[in-house]
Amino acid sequence: MNDSQLRELVPAVIGVLVRRGADFASAEDAVQEALVRALETWPDGPPRDPKGWLVTVAWHKFLDAARSEASRRGREQVVEVEPPAGPVPATDDTLRLYFLCAHPSLSPASAVALTLRAVGGLTTRQIAAAYLVPEATMAQRISRAKRRIAGQALDRPGDLGTVLRVLYLVFNEGYGGDIDLAGEAIRLARQVVASTGEPEAAGLLALMLLHHARRASRTGPDGRLVPLARQDRARWDTGLISEGVTILQGALARDRLGEYQAQAAIAALHADAPSAAETDWVQIVEWYDELLRLTDSPVVRLNRAVAVGEADGPRAGLAALAEVDPGVSRYAAVAAYLHERAGESEQAAQRYAEAARVAGSAAERDHLTREAARVRQWLRP
């Protein structure tokens, strides 16, 4: 096919591109580029269907040009809306977004879930794990919350308790999960304390600081989890511990006990112990009793069983565990630990293996698998 025959195809090819949605000028430019490509390649082997070849190449050229133009416009728009250079404000609107997402028309549970997803950056799977419900259930809850506030003005801030609950869950995911949100949760908790002065807000901040103080010791050099009893306490951040205890004492002095203050008191007792063996487990059980009175949470009952096992012996701990729903997360791991302390190695090994199968993270699964293998070594003849 010579040059004149090739150019005779141009109007028909332009017509095809226009019918596909291209404007005439862009279609013409794309066809001209396709012609140049044809003149470069066809001498080596012209296609069986010259028109079809030109349509395909010209359409790809048009799409490339359209994408490039869209990207250019996007970059220009970013520059246009970018704020001018200047001093950076000391605060941002993140905390305000937390309060606005905790909309009064939503139930506390729905508001927390929506805020965690929309502002906290957590996935539906992570939120479901924090609530101990299936992922599908949580997805439906978030969808319902979105529909409920659709079209409503987000100008009525939600209540403080809901916002504290959100920050608590964000911190827990950052502290023990696969997204580092702990520092952000602490920053926002400081803002809440400064703006409200509420003792429960102070209790939450103290709890975060006391847990964060132990973060460096929670994993070994190989990334493996290190249980509290085996952690190197010399690596604990004494500055954060001191600050957390001081904030907690100020909150407790106001005599308006809440769940975060009670949890912080338990964390403070762990932080105050020079070693695991010197932990005041009797007082920790007492604080868990207070926490149960405030929340009646199955997770609190589970943790209380561990404390009872340390304070009164593993048999007492297993008796306390019998009052806990076996479906609670980490139930099998606690059962394994108490059975091992009671000298029941076979049950302990089985429970550790069971806990590993349902572990919420790879690090936890690895730790529990190694615990099962360690206990099984004592069973070999």
Image (tube, rainbow, N blue to C red):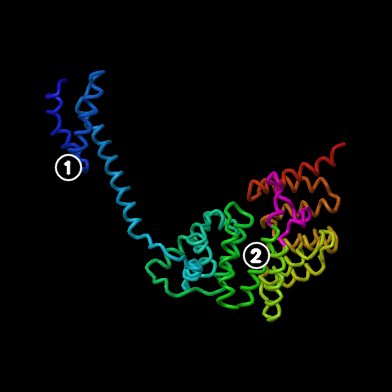
Reading the image, the residue beneath label 2 is: 208
Is residue 278 shown left or right of residue 113?
A: right
306 over 197 or under it: above or below: above
> Which picture quadrant has residue 373?
top right
User: The C terminus lies in which quarter of the figure?
Assistant: top right
51 over 339 or under it: above or below: above
Residue at horizontal 11 percent and vertical 24 percent from the top: 4
Is residue 325 shown left or right of residue 28?
A: right
| The magenta segment | 215-237
Crowding at dot 2, Cα within 10 Å, few <14 / some 14-19 / many 20+, comes out as many
CB-based contact (under 8 Å), mark 2 and mark 1: no
Q: Position of residue 277 (x, y in %)?
A: 84, 59
Reading the image, the residue beneath label 1 is: 25
Q: Position of residue 368 (x, y in %)?
A: 72, 47
Q: Along the polypeptide, which appears first: circle 2 or circle 1?
A: 1
> What is the magenta segment's predominant secondary structure?
loop
Residue kind at label 1, given as amino acid type: Ala
Q: Position of residue 321 (x, y in %)?
A: 76, 60
